[in-house]
Amino acid sequence: MNISQLFACAVAAAPAEPAVGTVVATGLILVFSVLILLYGLIVLQGKIFTAIDNKKKGSNTKNSEVTAPASTKSAPVASAAHIESGIPNEVIAAITAAISAMDGGKYTIRSLTRASGNTQRNAWGKAGVIAYTEPF
């Protein structure tokens, strides 16, 4: 038996393969249907989480220390704000500017006090700060 007879026998025994067009069409349909399904899931999650956030915003504004809304063109610190003595005006201005830049001027500062307690970090805290603030 020579090689050509062996190949002829192998071709005759192999099942017929589908046409190239069938494979390509099946692949395209499968890929795009999964993409459409994923798009639908992402849109659905977005609507669910937006509804949850809106519900939380409604209940948190009643209990928050920083409350809304002051005029966006008002002074950075409200005149009725309670500010602990010893805090420099530059620090107050920086904190107020950061809050204003973050929320577009919707909130006002009602009080500003220094943090109490030990401000020193332990070894694990220092390692965490170093790990998350080192350059890439």
Image (cartoon, grey):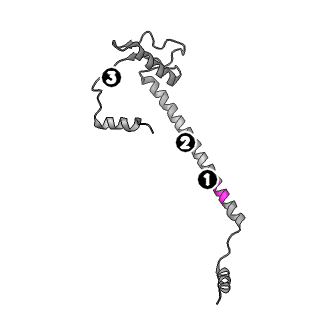
Q: Are marks 3 and 2 in contact (CB under 8 Å)?
A: no
Q: Inspect the image, locate mark 1, and give the three-letter code of the amino acid beneath it.
A: Val
Q: Which residue is disc 2 drawn over?
A: 45
Residue 115's disc number: 3
Q: Residue 91, position in %: x, y?
A: 40, 17
Of all residues, the one furthest to the top in this rendering is 79
Residue stretch rendered in magenta on the structure = 27-31
Name the element at disc 1: helix
Instruction: Describe residue 32's horizontal placement relative to residue 46 as left or right.
Output: right
Q: Amino acid at mark 3?
A: Ala
Between disc 3 and disc 2, whose residue precedes? 2
The reply to whether the magenta stretch includes residue 50 is: no
Give the image location of residue 53, x and y in percent.
50, 33
- Which x, y percent locates residue 85? 33, 12
Q: In the image, what residue occupies the spot 71% across and 68% down?
A: 19
**Residue at figure coordinates x 50%, y 25% from the top left:** 102
Which numbered marker is on residue 34?
A: 1
